[in-house]
Image (cartoon, helix red, strand yellow):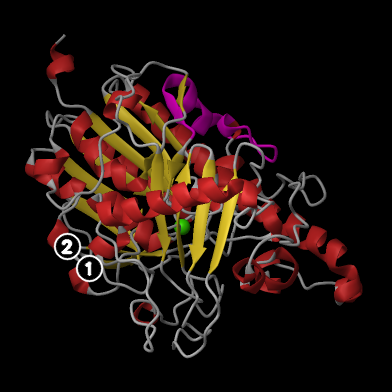
Amino acid sequence: MSHISRKPNIVFIMSDDHAAHAISAYGSHVNRTPHIDRIAKEGMRLDATYCTNAICSPSRASILTGTYSHVNKVPSIYAEFDYKLGTFPQVLQNHGYETALFGKWHLGHTYASTPRGFDDWKIFPGQGEYIDPDMISRSGKDVLSGYATDIVSDLGLRWLEERSESNKPFCMMLHHKAPHRPWIPDEKHKHLYPVGSIPEPSTLFDEYATRGRAAREARMTIVDDLEADDVKEVLPDHLAGDVNKHERTRWKYQRYMRDYLQCVQSVDDNVGRILDCLDQLNIAENTIVIYTSDQGFFLGDHGWYDKRFIYDESLQMPLLVRWPLEIPSGTTSREIVTNVDFASTFLDLCGIDGGTALPASQGRSFGPILRGQVPTDWPQSMYYRYWEHDDPVHHAWAHYGVRTKTHKLIYFYADGLDTEGAGNTTYPPEWELYDLVQDPQELNNVADDPQYAELREELETELKRLQEYYHDEPYSASPEGEGVSSHRGSRPN
Ligand code: CA
């Protein structure tokens, strides 16, 4: 039984923009992911895992540090990561873990922002490339030949085998760039999910009838904002113009999803390779395998691609955790957890108190939930804030909100911000409220429905309480548009 007292290993596999509803364990209508599903079958599927700021770099910073964006100073993709807070891999390294990171880092572009806390690392610069990607490490830059998702796993597999004689526990992080835009699949998957075969979501033609302006102003629509480069084909002439909007949406949706799902298939294959390797090395039993994505994604839902909004398709992160020694197999949880809770949880599972090791951490370990015990005072709501107001590509508006198990209140605080974030217009702020029990697709905004007045008041109080709890400043209009415009930039994401 000596292995029980031994610290567990961690294999953390994170993809980029992989929505839970493109995983069959989560009931996908559009694809099959047998290897990711295996983690669910042999461990726990968490059904209410939410990203606190649904975009790449901010989610990564929150995961590593256990803090909200206003604390870790990565509210947008234009910020550089500040290491002063410390990260959970650094803590593990300090506690005798061997640590490694391969794949997408996306937390800055200067030497000062290259990974720390890892014995070994190799990352894509910025977003990285799908085919024959550049990668950087301590020894400089290499060009690796092959397909990015395979390469990340190859690096991980080699590392696992090279250290297999070591007595130390390890933490290995594999950060896939897939299935991020521009969705370039591997040749060997190009026969899958052919055009015309992919079911459409029921909200593909959502016209935002009851929403505010934010939904209409966002430039994330399948119909008009996906470009020829995205769908890899020039739009036929007969699909242009206003009369053909539905046909155009369908045409682009099929091509977008074909490529997206083919990219996901590589991720799934590679999850299988890692699971097989753990079996072969005979270390699966005491290795915690985590599969997640930095946030969710709109798969034609509400007529969109991309993320950013607090709406569920983008807010929800897939989270599957397998640890045969401690987590009962085939279990699920509907408790609300967030990416801010990850660091404390992983440290806790390794027997380290996250509050002591990462004093700035705002998260709480959901270790007990993984073991099947829900603490009586577990939070019943979560706080969200999207900071990157009206970026030059997607034009999503800044907002914050609260999600409970049954409702969601959103505040788009555009007051005082113009489209350049310069702060010289006076759009009225907008509230949205969704009854997730009656309206799980969030189609019917009831913010001004008198029947929901009392509930709205309660949720506004809860939102204020959460902002105070996390020490986040509510937005207040100022002539400079301060606090938002400073996060703007020009690098597309
Ligand atoms: Ca992402």
**Viewer-nearest of discs 2 and 1:** 2
Is residue 28 magenta-colored?
Answer: yes
Locate residue 243: give its quadrant. bottom right
**Residue 300 visible to an observer of this rendering:** no
On screen, 422 above or below 67?
A: below
Locate residue 23: give its quadrant. top right
Residue indicated by mark 2: 83
On screen, 463 above or below 274?
A: below
Quarter of the picture containing the N terminus is: top left
Badge 2, how many Cα within 10 Å: few under 14, some, many 20+? some
Residue 175 locus on image (x, y percent): 38, 50
**Residue 440 visible to an observer of this rendering:** yes
In the foreground, 397 or 32: 397
Q: Amino acid at mark 1?
A: Ser
Region rendered in magenta? 25-47
Q: Amino acid at mark 2?
A: Tyr
Residue 111 locus on image (x, y percent): 20, 72
Is residue 167 magenta-colored?
Answer: no
- First in sequence: mark 2 vs mark 1: 2
Residue 165 locus on image (x, y percent): 16, 29
